[in-house]
Amino acid sequence: MPSAIELIQSLVNGVGIGLVYGLIAIGFCVIYNASGIVNFAQGVFVMLGGMFAYSFLVGMKLPLALAAAISIALVAVVGVLVQIAVIRPMWKRKAPMFAIILATLAVQLLIEQIVILTLGDQPRTYPEFTSGGPLKIGQVAIGYQLFWVLGCGALMVGLLTLFFNKTRVGRALRACSQNREAAALLGIPVGSMLVLSFALSAALGAAAGILITPMQYTSYSIDGPFGVSGFIAAIIGGFGSAPAALAGGILLGVVQSAAIVVFGAGYKNVIALTVLLIVLLFFPKGLFGGLAKRA
Amino acid sequence: MPSLIEVEGLSASYGHVAALKPVDLRVEEGEFVTVLGPNGAGKTTLLRAISRLVASQGRVSFKGQNISGLSTHRLAKLGIIMVQEGRGLFGEMTVYENLLLGAYNLGSEIEKVEGRFEQVFGLFPRLRERASQVAASMSGGEQQMLAVGRALMAGPKLLMLDEPSLGLAPKVAAEILDTLGELNRNGLGILLVEQKAPLALKLARRVYVLSSGSVRAELPANEIKSHHDLARYYFH
Ligand SMILES: Nc1ncnc2c1ncn2[C@@H]1O[C@H](COP(=O)(O)OP(=O)(O)OP(=O)(O)O)[C@@H](O)[C@H]1O
Ligand SMILES: [Mg+2]
C-alpha cells in the first residue's frame, strides 16, 4: 500500500494534469457545441503547442511570453486551416457526421507524420516557467509549474466564461450551439462561427500543451493520449460549460494519478476508461447533465 | 415600384419528393399576405426556401434586387426575417439574451439596440417582466411572443411567420396576430403562413392557397367568407 504522503502527492500531481485535461476538454466542447463535430484532432493542438513552444524557446531563444503567444497563434491558424480545408467542404456537401469525425482522425495522423518529417520524432522538453522549487509542504512537493497551470487555467476559464456570456460574438457562438438555423435567420454567419470555434479550441489546446510540457515532455505521439483523456474529461463534464469540462478533467487527472500510485503506471488508462464507464453507467448524461439537452 | 419580395418559379425537394413545385408569389411594400394550406402543403418548405434554409431553384428578388443565391444570414442582414415553425428559440438562454441576439446585426450600436428593446417591450410587456427567465421555461404563448419579439429586434423589412398560432389558446393567438396587424399598419411587410385562421384572413390583404406544393389560388382576403370557401382549393 502506498503511504498517505504518496497519495496526497499523487492528488496534487493529478490536479495539475487534470487541469490540462480540462483545457483540452473545453476545446472539445467549443467545437462540439458549435457544430456537433467531435474533433479527434484535438490532441494534435496540444502536441503542436508544446513542439512550437520548444522551437521558439529553445531553438530561437525567444522570451517565454513571446514564444507562447506565437505558438498559440500558429496553432490557432492550424485549427482554422483544418476547418477550412477539411471540415468545411465536407460540411457543405452534407457529409454524414461520422465521416467528418473520421476525417478529423485522419487529420491527426497526417499532422503527426508532418511533425515527424519536419521536427523529428525525438521527445523534447523545456524548463519550468519559474526556476527553483518545488515548494515543500511537509513531505509533499509542489512544483512551481503547477501554479502556472492553475493560474493560467483559471484565467483562461474566466476569460472564456466572460467571452461566452458577455460579448456579442461569444453569445452568437452559444446561439449556434443551441440552434444553428435560428442563429442564421438572425444574421449570425454560422460558417464563420465554426471557423472561430476551431481557432478557439486550437488555441486552448496549444496553451494546455505549452503548460504541460515542462512537467512531462512533448513529442509527435502525445496527441493520442492527451486527446483521449481530454475527450473522456469532456464526456464526464457532459459536453457542457467550460467549468464542467474543467471539473471533469480534474476528476480524471486525480483518479488517474491515484491509480498509478495504487496499482502501478500500467493501469493509468484502464482506470481512466473505467471512470468513464462508471460515470456513463450512473450518469448517462454526464456528471453535470450537459449531454441531456442534445440527445 | 418593385415588390418588397417577389418569388418566381421557386421550387424545392427533399430527395425525390418535390415538396414545393415551382411557385410564384409576391408581397408588396407594407402588404400583409397570408399563405393558407393543409398539413404537408409545403408552407414551411416555401418559407425555408425563401430564407435558403433548404436548397431551392427559382428566382427571388427583394425590392427589385436579385437575391436568389444569398445565404440565410445575408438575407437576414437585408431585413428578411423569419419566425420558424416551433419558434426556434435559444431555449437555454434568457429572454433578454434571446432578444439581444435578435439585434445581432446592429453590432455595438447600443442606442439603437435599446430603442428596439423599448419597441418590443412596448408591444409585449410580458417580455419585460420575464427578461431574466430562461426561454424554455416560459409558456407557449410567451415563447411565441419572444419569437416575434426577437424577430423585431432584427429590424425586419419583411417578416415571415410560420404558423405562429400553432398550439396556442385562441385568445393568446389573437393577441399575437393583433400585434402583427399593428406592425403592418405601421408599414411592415408581412408574409404569414397559417393552416386555418380566420384571424389571419381578417388581417391579410391577399391570400395564397397552397396545396400539394403548388399555389392553387390567389385571392383578395375579403373574398373568402368562410373556411369552406378554401376547402375546395385544398383537394385537386
Ligand atoms: N426534412 C424533410 N425530409 C423529407 N420530406 C420532408 C421534409 N420536410 C418536409 N417534407 C415533406 O414535404 C412536404 C411539405 O412539408 P412542409 O413541412 O413544407 O408542409 P407544411 O405545409 O408546412 O405542413 P404543416 O402544416 O404540417 O406544417 C410534406 O409532404 C413533408 O412530408
Ligand atoms: Mg409547416
Image (cartoon, rainbow, N blue to C red):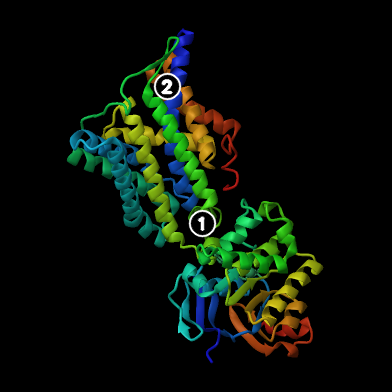
Q: Is residue A194 left or right of residue A121?
A: right
Residue A168: numbered disc:
1
Quarter-of-image position of residue A89: bottom left
Q: Residue at x 45, y 20 (%)?
A: A12
Subunit that carries the residue with mark 1: A
For this orientation, the residue located farthest to the right is B171
Quarter-of-image position of residue A121: top left
Q: Is residue B16 above or below residue A33?
A: below
Amino acid at pointer 1 = Arg
Q: Is residue B145 left or right of residue A287?
A: right
Across the whole image, how many numbered discs are drawn on residues?
A: 2
Q: Residues within 10 Å of mark 1 (few under 14, many from 20)?
A: some
Q: Classify mark 2: helix, strand or loop.
A: helix
Q: Nearer the viewer, mark 2 or mark 1?
A: 1
Answer yes or no: are tags 2 and 1 on the same subunit.
yes
Residue placed most toward the observer, A54 or B208 = A54
In the rendered image, residue A216, in percent from the top left (x then y), is placed at 32, 26
In the rendered image, residue A236, in percent from the top left (x then y), is placed at 52, 34
Subunit that carries the residue with mark 2: A
